[in-house]
């Protein structure tokens, strides 16, 4: 039997060289979903996708639930990926005795399970960071973050209010981060240990050896704080070790070309181009196993996206545009939502287009998408929309519409936390605390 670790050896100019084999069918089980030698399943990944300013219920929410839900006008762009998507409507961010902090409260509740009492009231980590602690430690990047808005403050991933994960803001910067000088092509003919990674690992190893002596002279609170700090350093050390180990061949990994530079701009056309370029890079980063956790921001909360020839931003229009008496909704606001859904569909298609095993990359991914409000005109906390895409390696069903009937939004991310293998008997706080998974979507 040929081992997946088998390498071809030879000589070149008097030096020994070795070349790895690609991911062959004989390395996989009969279903193409696990390694034949070890029985280990294909890696499962988790990602998020964010868009601002919600939706309009009459244009967005399907009237039927379950598998046979119909495409509404704002969901029409998802027609080609409907089978890959779950739609969640009617879930509320419950504020208890806290104020509605516009364009903040609902997304914060979705991300960390607590309805904040103030804009600096985020004391727990976001759901992607929680899942990264479970599955993110074995790749070069624990997680990758990007925003199509071009603004580095547009991040919804954090350890706490003072520690947001900074996203890459341009396609060229994201390309350099992933596929720059330190990238090791898993299908490349040669492997050279990065001297930069070796130096970093050496420095960290020397520092970590001193931790025990340092902790002896500290109080309990400082020891806990220092332990958290050094835990982070140890994770970095593990990731550096990953860079110093020749990666196994990955059939799906195709190193992309360096993308074009785009002019700065927040008009919907430029935003969409930037989003597509960054999506293609992020998808290939996942396919090349550079990360198993990823976050993409399409438009920020209180989206300031514009349309060429239109006066006012998406945000301003949601509040100032009159409801058309014949249509029964705000037509230009409707247009912006449809544009967002077109790009969400592109994101899903990009994951589905990559072959992995006998299926696609999307089959082994779970994407959580949501917004910052339900009805943006009134800063609504009710019916804040969300999606999942992908099947998480067979753990999640797709193609289902779930109606929340005013239950807390935290049931959606809690279900994903459990699906990704995190041991959490409950999640969230006060009225948003839940221990109930959404069983309709679990396999």
Image: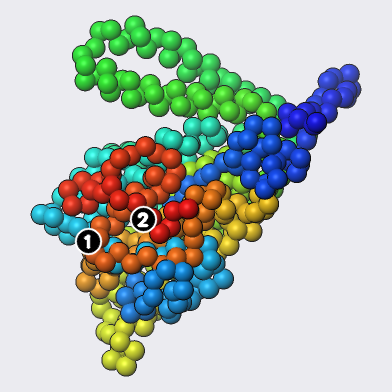
Please tell me whether residue 262 is drawn above or below residue 177 in the rendered image: below
Q: Residue 275, can we see it?
A: no
Residue positioned most to the left = 97
Q: Residues within 10 Å of mark 2 (few under 14, many from 20)?
A: some
* Residue occupied by mark 1: 102
Q: Secondary structure at mark 2?
A: loop
Q: Residue 188, can we see it?
A: yes
Specify the label residue 438 is tagged with.
2
Please tell me whether residue 101 is drawn above or below residue 220 in the rendered image: below
Q: Residues within 10 Å of mark 1 (few under 14, many from 20)?
A: some
Of 178 and 370, the residue lying toward us: 370
Q: Secondary structure at mark 1?
A: loop
Q: Residue at the location (36% across, 55% down)?
A: 438
Q: Residue at the location (25% across, 73% down)?
A: 377
Image quadrant of residue 192?
top right
Q: Residue at the location (49% across, 32% down)?
A: 137
């Amino acid at each position: 039997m040929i081992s997946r670790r088998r390498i071809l050896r030879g000589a070149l100019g008097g030096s020994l060289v070795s070349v790895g084999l690609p991911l062959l069918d004989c390395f996989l089980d009969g279903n193409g979903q696990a390694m034949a030698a070890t029985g280990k399943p294909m890696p499962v990944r988790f990602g998020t996708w964010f868009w601002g300013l919600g939706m309009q219920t009459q244009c967005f929410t399907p009237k039927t639930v379950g598998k046979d839900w119909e495409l509404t006008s704002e969901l029409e762009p998802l027609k080609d990926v409907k089978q890959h998507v779950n739609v969640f409507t009617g879930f509320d961010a419950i504020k208890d005795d806290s104020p509605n902090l516009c364009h903040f409260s609902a997304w914060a509740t979705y991300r960390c399970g607590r309805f904040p009492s103030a804009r600096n009231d985020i004391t727990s980590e976001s759901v992607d960071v929680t899942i990264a602690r479970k599955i993110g430690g074995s790749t070069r990047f624990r997680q990758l973050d990007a925003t199509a808005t071009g603004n580095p403050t547009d991040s919804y991933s954090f350890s706490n209010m003072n520690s947001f994960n900074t996203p890459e803001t341009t396609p060229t910067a994201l390309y350099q981060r992933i596929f720059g000088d330190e990238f090791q092509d898993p299908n490349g003919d040669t492997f050279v240990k990065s001297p930069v990674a070796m130096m970093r690992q050496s420095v960290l190893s020397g520092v970590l050896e001193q931790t025990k002596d340092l902790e002896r002279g500290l109080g309990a609170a400082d020891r806990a704080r220092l332990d958290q700090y050094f835990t982070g350093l140890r994770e970095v050390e593990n990731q550096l070790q990953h860079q110093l180990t020749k990666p196994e061949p990955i059939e799906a990994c195709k190193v992309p070309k360096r993308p074009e530079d785009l002019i700065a701009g927040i008009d919907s056309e430029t935003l969409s181009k930037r989003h597509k370029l960054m999506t293609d890079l992020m998808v290939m980063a996942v396919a090349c196993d550079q990360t198993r956790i990823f976050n993409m921001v399409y438009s920020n909360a209180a989206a300031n996206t514009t349309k060429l020839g239109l006066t006012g931003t998406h945000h301003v229009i949601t509040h100032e545009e009159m409801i058309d008496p014949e249509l029964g909704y705000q037509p230009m606001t409707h247009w912006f939502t449809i544009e967002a859904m077109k790009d969400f569909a592109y994101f899903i298609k990009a994951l589905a287009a990559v072959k992995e095993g006998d299926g696609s990359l999307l089959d082994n991914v779970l994407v959580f998408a949501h917004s910052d409000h339900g009805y943006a005109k009134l800063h609504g906390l009710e019916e804040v929309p969300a999606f999942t895409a992908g099947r998480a390696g067979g753990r999640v069903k797709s193609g289902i519409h779930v109606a929340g009937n005013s239950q807390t939004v935290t049931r959606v991310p809690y279900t994903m936390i459990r699906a990704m293998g995190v041991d959490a008997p409950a999640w969230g706080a006060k009225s948003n605390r839940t221990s109930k998974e959404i069983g309709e979507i679990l396999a």
